[in-house]
Image (cartoon, rainbow, N blue to C red):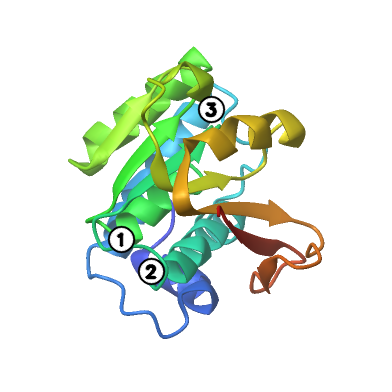
Amino acid sequence: MPTLSEDRIASLLAPYLGAFPATAALVPQLSAYLDLLLKWNARTNLTAIREPEAIVQRHFGESVFAGVQLASRVSPQGSVLDLGSGAGFPGLPIQLLLPELRVTLAESQNKKASFLREAVRTLGLPHTEVWAGRAEDMPAGRVFEVVTLRAVDNMAAALAAAWPRLRSGGRLLTYTSAPEPEVEAVLVPLTATFLSVQTRP
């Protein structure tokens, strides 16, 4: 039996989706993702947030909101690098919201990368790749339309790794507690978190 009903998940996600026309598969896939995350989190520390509704709001909601913002800024089959993906946020919910994107989840910690591979397999995501290593170790020519950063340990180091992975005109998405001057930012619903979008010249 699912941890939360699909109706409850849909209700919790509604403020983050707004009027975005999500596919019918989104909530069932997020339900499966939630159950898998809770199962793995019982033995591997994937996220400090353990209450299912809080996971849906903080992790799924904030990630889906990023996908909504990206939808009008990225080509339908564009490429996204989720740098320091951890348990898959925001990359996996973005992939579920925008299934034609090509999303790469970069995670250097082996246990977390193993979870990501299992999540990709369980959710049946043909356009999702798990890079089980540091983004700096990717082939030099690999660049992306979007790079996302959320809850990374060392933001300065993460930014240094992120910029070379962005193609010209690509966008960097970061989550911050306050908007930066001259950087496009939008407040995430129900939180004090801003989603900042920077464009590489």
Q: Residue furthest bottom?
A: 19
Q: Which residue is mark 1?
A: 98
Label at residue 71 = 2
Q: CA distance from mark 1 to mark 2?
A: 7 Å
Mark 1 or mark 2: name the one nearer the start of the chain: 2
Q: Which residue is mark 3?
A: 42
Q: Is residue 57 above or below residue 120?
A: below
Look at discs 1 and 3 and give the one toward the viewer.
1
Q: Of residues 2 and 65, which is closer to you in this image?
A: 65
**CB contact under 8 Å: marks 1 and 2:** yes
Q: Is residue 92 above or below residue 37?
A: below
Horizontally, residue 78 falls left or right of residue 154, namely: left
Q: Amino acid at mark 1?
A: Leu
Residue 196 spot, x, y in % from top left: 65, 61
Look at discs 1 and 2 and give the one toward the viewer.
2
Horizontally, residue 89 falls left or right of residue 182, namely: left
Q: Residue at x 28, y 39 (%)?
A: 128
Mark 2 or mark 3: name the one nearer the start of the chain: 3
